[in-house]
Image (cartoon, grey):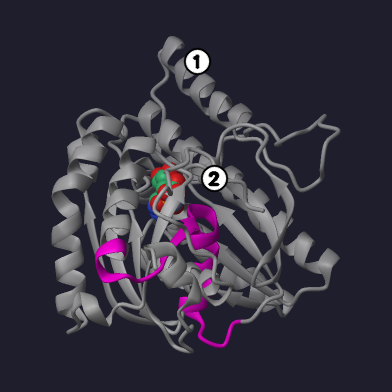
Amino acid sequence: MNYFDKVLSAPLKDNPIIMGIETSCDETAVAIIKGGREILADVIISSATEHAKFGGVVPEIASRSHTTAILKATEQALSNASLTLDDIDAFAVTEGAGLLGALLVGVSFAKSLAYSTGKPLIPVSHIRGHIAAAYLADKELKPPFISILASGGHTAIVAVDDYYTFNVFGSTIDDAVGEAFDKVARVLSLPYPGGPNVERLAKDGKNNIVLPKMLKNYSGGEFDFSYSGLKTAVINYVHNQKEKGVEINRADVAASFQHAAVDVIIDKAFKAAERRGYKTITVSGGVGANGYLRETLKARAEKDGVKLVLPEKRYCTDNGAMIGAEGYLQYKKRNFADLSLNAKAVVPLK
Ligand code: KG4
Ligand code: ZN
């Protein structure tokens, strides 16, 4: 029997041990997850410092770094979990969205592991992975819930109706919120990665600069976002003040931007929960690590009597555990790939 027929006909386990492999951007991440919820190991090797001198992720450097880090991350994960490759029941890997060359390292590596062990290969959507991180944060969490998806590539309010059914209430019509954080960081001369540095600077600032209201005359969906105008407004403010010879208070700019960028996400998420009659909100994606977002959400959830599931910061930014968690759900559906699996720059949420 060939590889694919064999994995398709093998019985499924109730509590499979799944390796999650993530290489879509600048983190080489490998985790081992049992039964979809228990983290047995979780290794992240980041190449962020190599990109910092260029002010953003350099795809070619990211791919090369994955190539050198992937075996190390895998061996480390197995060793941390006191397991061997033979104990792994399936290999889940991010197939997209992300940088193609970077993704290909993880996809090719996962394929070779699956083929050599005769175990299933599970393609995972990066975005679904981010959303699934919530299942690791709260072992009792069950859909339905509203997920705030706020990353470097996506910004959306998603209704997770059941484990496999997603309805996007609204999303960004241009830049993602993380992208806006990164661009504002640049104009404030903060190093990559921008988000955490904007947050740090904002701690010393006040929300006292008036920035334009998002999508003021927009006739599209009420849950949509636009970060391009906000980003441009910040850039214009900084340049105009410079031209006038007025020294800007960088911390105030950071704080004002952070408020404008985050408050709108929170408002729309709670409105979506109310509209849908859902009592739980979760957070996913790198911007979910933002302290201001987290604290504001906590306060609002308490006030509104909504249950909030906040994954640890480590599980908001890219990691392998979230790929293992989503991989488990796909395992249960036997959504396995054959060895022609390829990386995809874009994967619809579906
Ligand atoms: O989810 P993620 O790790 O990768 C993508 O799938 O895009 O998100 C990365 C994004 C970057 O834009 C980064 O600046 C932002 O998340 N980010 C933050 C924070 N930590 C990461 N933004 C604001 N505050 C943070 N603490
Ligand atoms: Zn991500």
The residue closer to the viewer here, 278 or 197, is: 278
Residue 33 vs residue 206: left or right?
left
How far apart marks 2 and 1 lie (CA) works out to 19 Å
Residue 191 vs residue 332: left or right?
left
Q: Image point 54% across, 65% down: which residue?
A: 335
Q: Residue lying at the far top in this picture: please name it.
A: 243
Q: Is 287 situated above or below 103?
A: below
Total number of numbered discs in the rendering: 2
Residue 330 vs residue 199: left or right?
right
- The answer to whether the residues at label 2 and label 1 have Cβ atoms under 8 Å apart is no
Circle 1 SS class? helix
Instruction: List x then y, in percent, for residue 195.
Output: 40, 45
Indicate the amino acid at tag 1: Asn
Mark earlier in primary sequence (2, 1): 2
Indicate the amino acid at tag 2: Asn
Task: Write down the residue under mark 2.
Answer: 207
- Residue range (magenta): 115-141
In magenta segment, residue 139: yes
Residue 274 is drawn in which quadrant? bottom right
Residue 18 vs residue 229: left or right?
left
The residue closer to the viewer here, 60 or 202, is: 60
Q: Is 80 situated above or below 66?
A: below
Mark 1, Cα crowd under 10 Å, few <14 / some 14-19 / many 20+, is few
